[in-house]
Image (cartoon, helix red, strand yellow):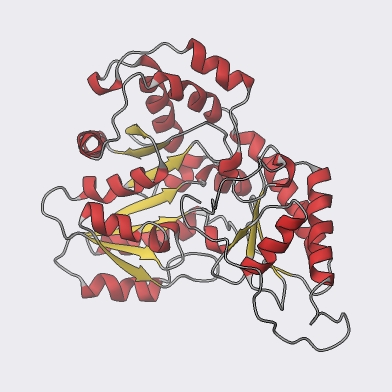
Amino acid sequence: MATGAPGPVPDPRLDFRSDTRTVPDPRMRAASALAEVGDDVYGDDPTAAALEARTAELLGTEAALFVPTGTMANLLAPLAAFPGPAGTRLIVGADSHMGFLEADGLRRFGGLDPVLAEQDADGLLNPGHLEELLAAGTGRPTVVCLENTSMMRSGNALDEAATRTVARLAHRYGAHFHLDGARLAHAAVALGVPPATLAAPADSVAFSVSKALGAPIGALLGGSRTYVARARELRTGLGGSLHQTGVVAAPALIALGRLPELAADHATAAALAAGLRALPGVEVLGPAHPTNMVMARVPGLTPDACAARLALHGVRVLPLPNGHVRFVTHRAHDMIGVREAVGALAAVRAAVPSYRPDGPRRQLPDRGGSLTAMEEA
């Protein structure tokens, strides 16, 4: 998401901007070096084929397609759903990654028409508003998209019942239902169910291996065999076809075996949330089903200012438009880093002139500068 100008490499234990900050470990690097490869454009890279088959099994879909990024998976998803003339209507959550970070690309490169739907506090598309939007577009090809986990709801995990609510509405109006499951693995671990259970109501699902699972690049798009075959053809047109794909598919295969390890990330996030919540005057969001995200707010500071001041203490976070800064935990983080992050925010909070533990607060102007440049989250 936020990049900014090049600078010194931050301490991994204090860089909480995103779980995309993971790096491939020695086992993954060795797998890349030893991977059996062919040419995926010709369909004969055995490692890529194994990754796609394993992911399809994990998601409970007939097939899956490996692509370089989750953004490409989410662009391919609606294009493969309704091949033909441009103009497919895309109903996405207003606060979802596809809604406020990918909409321009969907519009520009896919000829799609994104329509923003209201989201409830847990991140679910509001059923009443969703039905209004579906009813208003009868006759047009429509794709309904749901994000799980919900990034702007502090990484809340949506359960199968919630997902089925959206799926039933979408299918009632003949719409294709796409699940943006960039962090579906986190949702599955938090809820104690297989990813296939959460993906079952969807017609297509995007699944990232390059966030907390730690692969260097990549996402997969799952669906029926016919659907994935269409997506494979479209991938070529978008420039997403790779050749000796096994070099990056091999570490992704290792990543798929690490879902249980995500529970440790959730425990780290829970410890961080507890520490931040204990700080006087700091507000921390409390999702119903927390995963590896913590969102905190310091009254008197904008998110950009808060992030800038934390950076002076060596702690990197992501400022968000919902008034909070975001911490995301992954395998590089430990309790030492958590304690330092809590201490840094305590110091930032104490330095806000408007802060009085027992007195009134006044809003200060932001003098911290802007750090936000939205990209992959």
Query: 185 or 311, which is in the foreground?
Result: 311
Q: From the top left corner, tell me how far across and down residue 6 is, in percent.
A: 57, 45
Q: From the top left corner, tell me how far across and down residue 74 is, in percent.
A: 35, 48
Query: 86 or 57, which is in the foreground?
Result: 86
Quarter where residue 211 is shown: top right
Q: Residue at x 62, y 48 (%)?
A: 190
Q: Residue at x 54, y 54 (%)?
A: 2
Horizontally, is 52 left or right of 241 in the view?
right
Quarter where residue 327 is shown: bottom right
Q: Residue at x 50, y 17 (%)?
A: 32
Q: From the top left corner, tell me how far across and down residue 157 is, in percent.
A: 56, 55
Query: 306 or 203, which is in the foreground?
Result: 306
Query: 302 or 117, which is in the foreground?
Result: 302
Q: From the top left corner, tell me how far across and down residue 175 is, in percent.
A: 25, 59
Vertical relation: 29 (above or below) 92: above
Horizontally, is 271 left or right of 176 in the view?
right
Horizontally, is 141 left or right of 357 in the view?
left
